[in-house]
Amino acid sequence: MATRFKKTALGHQEIREPSLGLPRNARLVLVLSDGQRTLKELMSLVKGASADDIALLLHKGLIDDIEAVVLGQGARSKHDSGDSSQPVSSEAAAGADPADPRMCVLNL
């Protein structure tokens, strides 16, 4: 099944009232994340978009993986303290559960 992303409530808020200073490509991916387009489609629609843009939007809680939402997991990992202004540390990433379906999302 192809990975699809949708905007969260925070994502909708960021579109209405930009406050996070998102890079252009990340913002465009956010706008186009409608739950219908696949990851591959999003990447092809936004020239220059990368896995880093998706990772940033997921980390900030602006988009959710539709499949993770259905499974009740949402965008935040168990390592995320809720402070989306800080990047995930390498220690937290190293402790991530490889069985978590979100961990394979960005394998383009």
Image (cartoon, grey):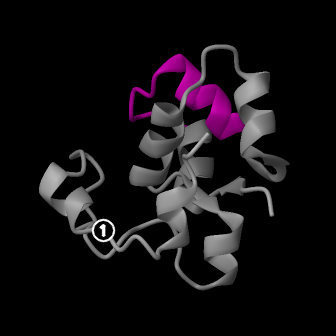
Check the image and report above or below for 13 versus 80.
above
In terms of depth relative to the viewer, which is nearer, 101 or 17? Answer: 101
Q: Does residue 82 appear left or right of residue 60 in this picture?
A: left
Q: Which residues are magenta?
A: 17-31
The percent coordinates of residue 79 (x first, y second) are 25, 70
The percent coordinates of residue 43 (x first, y second) are 70, 30
The percent coordinates of residue 75 (x first, y second) are 49, 65
The percent coordinates of residue 54 (x first, y second) are 53, 41
**Quadrant location of the C terminus in the rendered image:** top right
Q: Amino acid at mark 1?
A: Ala
In the rendered image, which residue does mark 1 sit on? 96
Residue 25 visible in the shown view: yes
Neighbor class of circle 1 (other Cα within 10 Å; few <14, some 14-19, many 20+) is: some
Q: Residue at x 52, y 35 (%)?
A: 51
Q: Residue at x 45, y 33 (%)?
A: 52
**Quadrant location of the N terminus in the rendered image:** bottom right
Magenta span includes 78: no
